[in-house]
Amino acid sequence: MKNGFPALIKGIQEADQWAAREKWRPLESLLEHYGQVPLKVGEVPPIHGMGRAYQIRLPLVLFKEYADTATGDSPFYGFEYDFNDERAALLSDYKIPEYFQSDFFDVDPIARNFYTNNRHLIVGGERTGTNLHFDPKGTSAWNSLLIGRKKWAIFPPGTDMEYIQKIKTRTCSSGTAPGGPASYWWLDIAPTLPADVGMVEFIQNPGDTVFVPPGWWHAVINIEFSMAITQNVLIPESLPFVWAQLRKDWPKFVQYIESNYPEKLQELGVQDITPSEKRILSLEDEEFLVEFHSTQNQ
């Protein structure tokens, strides 16, 4: 994981002990245990453009029925990040693989609050997926598939305009390409890409875990009804490679870390550290809250 390249891990040892292996598959077992648990399958923006979006949730058993009969180009795709109430039991069914347990956002509670919604349960039917993007805030991601099959396309990092034009997407600071059905990218764009863009395609099967390093572009589509767990992590060893971009995009986070943990950064090989007066922020700190709230939907 430390060499900066993606990986397809064919099974991880600790997953043999996960309760999810028995409770989440086969599909009938998943529905027996969690069929009535509501999961987020979409959201509706506020009518007047103010406030939070309205979360659409369906019991898993009803969402499965929907996924089996959906014929539209852009079916609902469930990305659940709220593990309170009935969903809390889902977290006890698996553990973070040892490869991915080091997350620099966990250095203290304030740092963690710069990226709170970093773990998701992902569930969707055939043709659902994500458009070409790279993950936010310098993070890597791991994705363990329990049910179904996914097709992946991964590209090396690159944000200059020539490269963006080659892979036929557009980017913003968060690395997110414009919307549209995920299937359109696979049908209309992927077959036309030149060989020198470095695209690698592969199939993820149940029990496989995919690791995506920071900055690597990727698109994913579900070949059949699928359910996976995924989490974004700021791997400490990656900090020398992502710190400059973090400084540009998330200056308050960088200022906080450089002021409070300069020794840790130096140990990890981060250059050009500019620690200022040490600051102990709190969630009531007004300057902190401005950036904190601006990051929560990224």
Image (spheres, rainbow, N blue to C red):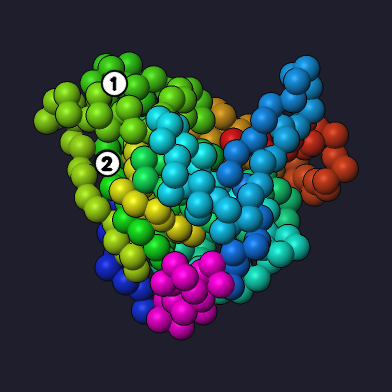
Instruction: Rate crowding at label 2 as few (under 14), some (14 to 19) or many (20 or more) other CA atoms within 10 Å.
Output: some
Of residues 218 and 1, the one nearer the viewer is 218
Of residues 4 and 295, the one nearer the viewer is 295
The residue singled out by tag 1 in the image is 168
Tell me the kind of residue under disc 2.
Ala
Residue shown at 45%/58% (left/top)?
A: 228
Q: Which residues are magenta?
A: 15-32
Residue shown at 34%/33% (left/top)?
A: 183
- Measured from the top left, where is residue 209 in percent x and y? 35, 62
Residue 95 visible somewhere in the drawing = no
Is residue 281 rendered magenta in the image? Answer: no
Residue shown at 51%/69% (left/top)?
A: 30
Measured Cα–Cα span from mark 1 to mark 2? 14 Å
Would residue 225 be found to the left or right of residue 62 on screen? Answer: left
Which residue is outermost to the right?
A: 284
Q: Would you say the magenta stretch is mainly helix, strand or loop?
A: helix
The residue singled out by tag 2 in the image is 153
Looking at the image, residue 35 lies above or below residue 287 = below
Q: Give residue 216's quadrant in the image.
A: top left
Would residue 203 be found to the left or right of residue 207 on screen? Answer: left
Of residues 182 and 170, the one nearer the viewer is 182
Is residue 26 rendered magenta in the image? Answer: yes
- Measured from the top left, where is residue 52 in percent x and y? 75, 32
Looking at the image, residue 81 lies above or below residue 186 = below
Of residues 248 and 263, the one nearer the viewer is 248
Identify the mark nearer the N-term, 1 or 2.
2
Would residue 67 be found to the left or right of residue 45 on screen? Answer: left
SS assignment at label 1: loop
Q: Are marks 1 and 2 in contact (CB under 8 Å)?
A: no
Tell me the kind of residue under disc 1.
Lys
Residue 19 visible somewhere in the drawing = yes
